[in-house]
Amino acid sequence: MRIMGLDVGDKTIGVAVSDPLGWTAQGVEVIRRDGREMARLVELVGKFEVQKLVVGLPLNMNGTLGPQGEKVLAFIEKLKKSLNLPVDTWDERLSTVASEKILLAADVSRAGRRKVIDKMAAAFILQGYLDANGSREE
């Protein structure tokens, strides 16, 4: 089963998908939030034959839900209506920080990091979900 991971921000949405067996997550693209993002997500779901979505839920460091988390939950409701697929959330605390560290270690320029950080964060979120939930088909 192929799963799509999303890192939802105010300006962009990072997108990642799993391989068909649910072993690994790969970053796909970064979608600009310009009112057409849902149509693009519908296209990607069809292209990759996605059967489930995992959305990073930004929690405060103490585990509570803040304003950004509320925005993501509202976006998830739109996703459910538009895509008619199951949606799980995954604690995304520090996913962008971890992605940034990896890119810095790889000596990627600031401009290069800005282009890929959201899809890397989406891949980080999805990989954590896959590892924790044993999504691999046996």
Image (tube, helix red, strand yellow):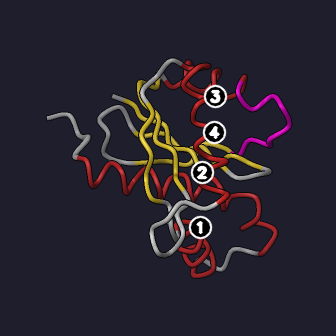
Q: Give the residue at mark 1.
A: 96
Amino acid found under the numbered disc labelled 4? Ala
Pointer 2: what residue? 7
Q: Nearer the viewer, mark 2 or mark 3?
A: 3
Q: CA distance from mark 4 to mark 2?
A: 14 Å
Labelled pair 4, 3 in contact (Cβ < 8 Å)? yes
Q: Which residue is mark 4?
A: 74
Crowd tier of the residue under label 3, counting other residues whose Cα lies within 10 Å: few below 14, some 14–19, many 20 or above: few
How far apart are the two marked residues, 1 and 4, measured between alpha carbons?
21 Å
The residue at 61%/62% (across/down) is: 66
Which disc number belongs to residue 88? none
Judged from the image, the secondary structure of the residue bearing numbered disc 2 is strand
Residues at marks 1 and 3, CA–CA distance in whole angstroms = 24 Å
Q: Nearer the viewer, mark 1 or mark 4?
A: 4
How many labels, in total?
4
Write the start and end of the magenta stretch as one range: 30-38
Contact? badges 1 and 2 (CB < 8 Å): yes
Viewer-nearest residue: 49 or 60:
60
User: Which mark is first along the chain, 3 or 1?
Assistant: 3
Residue 43 position by quadrant: top right
Q: Classify 2 as above or below 68.
A: above
Q: Amino acid at mark 1?
A: Thr
Tell me: 112 left or right of 48.
right
Residue 86 position within the rendered picture, expressed as x and y whole percent measured from the top left: 42, 27
Mark 2 residue type? Asp
- Give left or right: position of 62 versus 77: left
